Image (cartoon, rainbow, N blue to C red):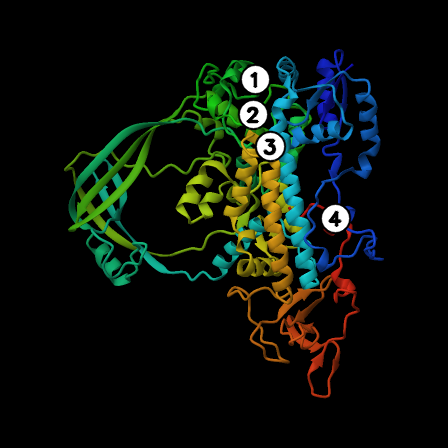
Amino acid sequence: MKLVIAEKPSMARAIRDVVGREYEVTNAFGHILELAEPDDYLPDSLPVSPKTGRKIWRDEDLPIIPKVWKQIPKKEAKDQLKKIGDLLKKADLVVNAGDPDREGQLLIDEILEHFGYRGRVERVWLSALDRVSVEKAFRKLEDNRKYRPLRDAAMGRSQADWLVGMNCTRASTLSSGTFYSIGRVQTPTLALVVRRDRTIENFVPRDYFDVLAHVRHEKGAFEARWKPASTDGSGFDEEGRLTDRRLAEAIAAKAIGPGKISRFEKKEQKQQAPLPYNLSALQKAASSRYGLSADEVLKTCQSLYEKKVTTYPRTDCRYLPEEQWGDAARILRSLQLPADLRKNVDPACRHAVWNTAKVTAHHAIIPTGESATDLSDRERKLYDMIRKSYVALFLPEYRFYAISLAVELGGETWTASGRQEIDSGWKDLYEQSSDEEETEDAAPLPDCKLGDPVVGQGGSAIAKQTRPPSRFTDGTLIEAMSNIHKFVEDPVAKKTLKETSGIGTEATRATILETLVKREYIVRKGKQILSTEKGRSLVGFLEATLPDLVDPVTTARWEDSLSEVAEGSRSMDDFVGGIAGLVRSHTGTILTKGRGQLVSGSKTSDRPQVVCPLCGGETSLVRLPSKKKKGLFFWICPNKDASGTPVHPPLSDENGKPGKPFGEVNPSGSKTAKPLSRTGNGRGQANTRGGASHSKRGAR
């Protein structure tokens, strides 16, 4: 029997429809095996928390570094796993039909390893699920052993995430008494948001001036901007902006009377349509246009893929293989287009997108040519964006004249640039809609010649202010994660990261954002993403103690190492062993230095400083939400005595300000907290949170 194991039911149905007579087809439900929990590696003698039913968390058990990793079936998938096992007993050939990426490779391979299957295994690489694509893929089956490095990279990633997440999360939670998750990817991503919020909240706007001349030429009027001979003198800031109002007004007053064109350049230029989308580009565009979260875009694209109308969504590539160029005519015939545009569509057009050398594991997201009917509103919107990005490749180039000029007027030089449209080409498809990735056209300028006379009709000193960067949105945060080099100052690392790396992968970034929301580290406010006090506390603590855990360079380099594993140039054990060494050091640091710091976080100038009314300590009070009743808050003073005990209990919240303390008053007049019940390691039961919601691999 020849058996195909697909990653999910929808993929199995698509494969069965095409090759069901030749192959038996079954499926997984994504990963149906998972790495065992820490409890499986801890002593059986360890007490169990009556609240969670799991072994308590203790300092002395950290770090947990498995010598032999265990995988266990997910409870909800045990029946399906047994079904696959029964089929494997009869199979003399198995086809791995996981998604075409390293996770897809692993989730089928790990099933075969679980059952110890020793028969022949081949791999099918399915970038789309329409009949034509499935037929082509099954004609190109390869030996599954070729993809062993992909499996190792996925398993190495999983084990590394487990080591960092399980150990650092337990250490930070034990140190603070509050659940704090730390993850290899989520924590540097959180740091991006926290640092952006700090920059915005600490931003002090600065005044500056643009000086414009209103100029008339015989062929039309235009505006030109003053170009100073030098910006090194007084009246300019370090960025070369004019800050002196009187100087700005004096220059503007010169923009009157006769002048001449001192430079004029006009060049014809052509612009091809933008490259089609990869996942992060689509997430950014859909966030901006429709306000969709990264996770909503991913799930919708996955649905379109499963409906066979678009290709595989979790791609980081925006190019297409040259061998698929021949499919263009078929796909274009299936797409709805206005008649006036269809006549300009040329299937023989050879856009720069067709470049096999630039295609990674997956190509750009494009339509498959299948009928796109019965789509939800969200599916229709994203499908339309994908459809247009493909059609635009076969429309004429956008052609225009790029114009730049300089004017001598009033003893000063003024410059302007613009363009004259020749042929709108592919831009007609977008009808100036916001899903087009181009900027607004520059203002039109008249045709001039060198030496042409002009007349200055006055000037304007336009008062402006510098602006802070914008808050992150789902789209811009995904873009920041995938273009992390823009946030790195080290020139060597910046160059390397620009070529190779980002934080996370196309397949995981949306999940990371949802994890940060679930952990209450960030919140969404409309389209904006903002960090919470809890998120800032964690980042502040790590910046002061373990900066590599919030440094995007570290995480991106780990992704580079995983790429080396996927390419077969580095072993999985070498990568995981390096992470284990870091974890040993980091858990000790967190346990030692985290006590009393994570609750309050480090001081940050963006957080209001509230002096404690009881002890007047220098460390600011922190306002925290009650876990028992939504909408209630309390205040904590991080000051402690020599034994590490809080000098007084928390304070109530009275209209957003610290109120009366909980607890009782000592004869000396100071307040004392009621003692916690202790376990053998001196930590209260409140510090042994090991429930299922805190022990999963969400701390990625």
Q: Earlier in the sequence, mark 1 or mark 2?
A: 1
The residue carrying mark 3 is 314
- In space, the residues marked 3 and 1 are separated at their CA atoms by 21 Å
What residue sits 41% from the left and 21% below the top?
396
* Type of the residue with mark 4: Pro
User: Residue 648: percent from the left, percent from the top?
Assistant: 69, 77
* Type of the residue with mark 1: Ile
The residue carrying mark 1 is 331
Q: Which mark is residue 366?
A: 2
Could you tell me which secondary element the residue under label 1 belongs to? helix
What residue sits 69% from the left and 23% below the top?
96
- In space, the residues marked 2 and 4 are separated at their CA atoms by 42 Å
- In space, the residues marked 4 and 1 are separated at their CA atoms by 50 Å
- In space, the residues marked 3 and 4 are separated at their CA atoms by 30 Å
10 Å crowding of disc 2: few (<14), some (14-19), many (20+): many
Relative to 396, does residue 637 appear above or below in the rendering? below
Query: Which quadrant: the N terminus?
Result: top right
Q: Earlier in the sequence, mark 3 or mark 2?
A: 3
Q: Nearer the viewer, mark 2 or mark 4?
A: 4
Q: Nearer the viewer, mark 3 or mark 1?
A: 3
Q: Nearer the viewer, mark 1 or mark 2?
A: 2
Q: Is residue 572 left or right of residue 409?
A: right
Q: Earlier in the sequence, mark 3 or mark 1?
A: 3
User: Residue 491: percent from the left, percent from the top?
Assistant: 39, 46
The residue carrying mark 4 is 38
Disc 1, disc 2: CB below 8 Å? yes
- In space, the residues marked 3 and 2 are separated at their CA atoms by 12 Å
* Type of the residue with mark 2: Ile
